[in-house]
Image (cartoon, rainbow, N blue to C red):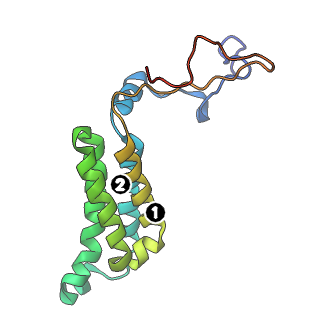
Amino acid sequence: MASAASRPPVGAAVPAGGRRPPRAFAAWRRRRPFWGGLLLLLGGGEILLTEQASISVVLQAGAGGIAAYLLPLVMAVCGLLMILNPAQRLFYSVVGVLVSLGSWITSNLGGFFVGLLLGVIGSSMAFGWLPDQEPRRWRRRAPGKKPDPEVRADSAG
């Protein structure tokens, strides 16, 4: 059992398992569209896992069968490249959303809509990500306390 000194204060948010992610990884993650790329990567992986035909049957079927494997593979690669190369996130997110929508026709309705939705949402998140934006820190005010008049609601000058 943990002693009272090692426990966080009452009301403090503690992640599952009671441990914080390493600061270096958290700082690295904030400098890139991590969650958008991860969702696109997971969407491509989900569509690849829901494929019915084996690769030998696909090669005999021709271009239509190969597209069923090629599009989710491109989704996964775009998601990985978004995470590793955030400077090109706009290109990868546009390609990712187009390929995600194309998987609806070629790959079992886009992995039964799950992979399609993960890909579209992840690409949209990466497209809207801004690298120079400070993360928001949400704080609760005490009941009845008014906001500070010196702090503006928006950051526009």
**Is residue 12 positioned above or below 72 on the image?**
above
**Is residue 84 positioned above or below 124 on the image?**
above
Question: What amino acid type should be assigned to the residue bearing mark 2?
Answer: Leu
- Residue 127 location (% of width, % of height): 35, 47
Q: What residue is rendered at 70% in x and 15% in y?
A: 3
- Residue 145 location (% of width, % of height): 76, 16
Q: According to the image, label 1 marks what residue?
A: 117
- Of mark 1 and mark 2, the one earlier in the sequence is 2
Q: Residue furthest front?
A: 157
Q: What residue is rendered at 27% in x and 72% in y?
A: 69
Q: According to the image, label 2 marks what residue?
A: 41
Secondary element under disc 2, as helix, strand or loop, is: helix
Question: Image check: 145 left or right of 74?
Answer: right
- Give residue 64's mark: none
Question: Image check: 66 left or right of 140?
Answer: left
Q: What residue is rendered at 38% in x and 25% in y?
A: 27
Q: Quadrant of the C terminus?
A: top left
Q: Nearer the viewer, residue 41 or 20?
A: 41
Q: Nearer the viewer, residue 69 or 130?
A: 130
Question: What amino acid type should be assigned to the residue bearing mark 1?
Answer: Leu
Quadrant of res 28? top left
